[in-house]
Structure formats: C-alpha cells, structure tokens
Image (cartoon, grey):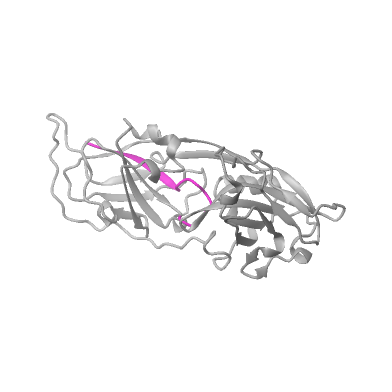
Amino acid sequence: MLTPLLLPTLLACTPAGTSDIVPKTGSSSTSTLTGFPPLGADLVVTDDSVHTFDAQWILPSATLRADLDATLTWSAVATDGWGEARDPATFQVAALFRTEASRADTARALAVDQLDALVTDAWTADVAGDTQVRLSALQGPGGAFDPAVDLVEDAGATLLFLLCDRDGARLDPRTGLTIEPRQDEAGSVLPVPDAVPRIEWTAALDGDTLRTEATYDDWPLDWSAVTTDGYGQPYDNARADELFLARYDDVDEADDLSARLVDLPATAVDYWTAPLSGTSAHLSDLAGFDALASGGIYLVGARCTTCLGPAPLWVAGLEVR
C-alpha cells in the first residue's frame, strides 16, 4: 500500500471521521404547485442515486536497458490520451510509479482510481516547458530515482510513467506508458508515442434523482447509505475530502450532464465546495451558498482532491421544485 508519507500531494487522502446530521431549524415548506404535497428538505443519497463511471486506460509498453539511466522524451506527442491537441511542452509533471502488479492490473487500477493500493514507490519531476526528462531527475520521498536499484528486471512489478497536468492538489494523468527494464535491451532513450496511449470512458447519471423544494432555509444531506462509489469500487469515505454542489441552466435533467462528469466545474453556472468530514452535511456548509433556486438542475457529490481519478467518488442529481 502507498503510505501517507509517500508523495502526499499525489495520492494520500486525508482520513475523515464520522458525524451525524445535527438538526437545524428552518422554515417549513409549502408547495408552490397546488395539489402537490410538499417535498422534504432532507436529501438522502443511496447507491441507487450514485453515478457510474466506466473507464479503461490503453497504455503501450516499451523496453529499456536495465540498470542504466535513460531519457524519456515526448516531443512527438501532439494528442494526449484524452484525444485533446497538445503542445508537448505544456505537460506539467512527469510521474513514475512502481507497482507490485502486472501491467494489465496496473492500467486497470489507474482507470478505477485504485492505483494507490498497488504503488510501492513513486517519483516526480516538474517538466513544464520541457519535452524530456532523465530518469535520475525524478525525485521521491526516499530520494532520486536510482537506475541501478530501481530500473531492474522484475517480472512481478510494473513501472508506470505518466505525463500529468495539475488539477489543484491532484495530478491529472494525460498520457503515458509502462516500462519494462531488460538486461538484453540496448536502448537508453524512450519516446512516448503520439495518440496511442488513451483513456476510453462512459458515464451515466441516470440514478434516482434527489428532489426538494426551494422554500427551505437549509437542506440536510446524508450519504451514509452509499456503499459503492462511481467507479464500481467499495466506497471509502476516508478518501473523500471535498463536498461540492453545482448548478446548471443549460440542461433539462441531471442525466444530460453525464458527458461532463470529468470536468463539472467548467460549465456550471454556480459551483460551491466545502471540506468534507463524516457522512453527512448541510448545504449551508458550502462556502458562498445561499439557497437552491426553483426549477434548477443541480449535481451534488464528493470527491478526493488528491487522487488520480478524474471523476468524483459519487455524484447525485438534484432537482428543485
């Protein structure tokens, strides 16, 4: 397992405690639609409400001479793994991870945001403005990458090289490959191929939509019943460190936002966040939040701001009457 001391800005997720909803006083709601009973203020998220995010990383593998320092270059990369055009000098961080798993299992763990469970060592370097890096320039908690020690033949281990952007405290993998050290290999320069590494993903927000009214003073939120996250893994609330609420005006229902799941803040009309602790909160805890708007389409969810996964841990749609 990756310890909290190993690249905390990369993969460590702050453990959170547990808490119960503390009732807050608020005005009672009277439905504005004659003949319809008022909807409650309490918002309860269950597994039936949570989004799904299915992804796989297709990562090529390349060989390098074991035991010797080498240069990795990405000067030919014009399209990243998300299919976006790139100036190769705009990648911000080069990261190298060692896992005690096969290449296939390592790529699968990256896709479902479980790489930290496999990583035993990690090294990074800031590479903004560059298109190559020496392995020995990568730094980890135990010091620089040492090819004589760290670049060795090991059938039970995988070296995963990623070029990343920064997304706040987290690294956002954009392309990469796996490295196979071999004693019979002569090469000491390894190019990252253009457009070959890629992520393929689909998402759905078609679960049970939360519904409430706009006339309350506050809205208690409880997600203690969530047992499976959006990646299909057992939900670990200790990994979640941020609660968010986003409002959208250009859609008719929450499911219309599925294609934006990896970049929700960019197209939101309003976006509010709060540090997350426990399995319950109030919407009034969100910084700058005032009230829900009648007729609005919202998404509420929890994310890990230091994990490699691009999607939140859970997201639920919220409609306001």
Q: Residue at x 66, y 48 (%)?
A: 74
Vertical order, 139 against 30 (above or below)? below
Q: Quadrant of residue 143?
A: bottom right
Residue 294: give x, y in percent of width and height. Answer: 20, 38
Queried whether the magenta region covers residue 310, the answer comes back as yes
Q: Quadrant of residue 207?
A: top left
- Quadrant location, the C terminus: top left
Residue 24: give x, y in percent of width and height. Answer: 20, 56
Point out the residue furthest to the right here. 184
The residue closer to the viewer here, 23 or 297, is 297
Q: Is residue 155 visible?
A: no
Queried whether the magenta region covers residue 172, the answer comes back as no
- Quadrant location, the N terminus: bottom right
The residue closer to the viewer here, 311 or 62, is 62
Vertical order, 128 against 301 (above or below)? below
Q: Is residue 178 visible?
A: yes
Q: Residue at x 45, y 35 (%)?
A: 259
Residue 201: give x, y in percent of width and height. Answer: 54, 37
Q: Quadrant of residue 69?
A: bottom right
Point out the residue furthest to the bottom here. 142
Q: Residue at x 69, y 51 (%)?
A: 73
Query: How many numbered callouts?
Result: 0
272 with respect to 69 (left or right): left
172 with respect to 320 (left or right): right
User: Magenta region: which residues?
Assistant: 305-321
Residue 83: give x, y in percent of width and height. Answer: 57, 37
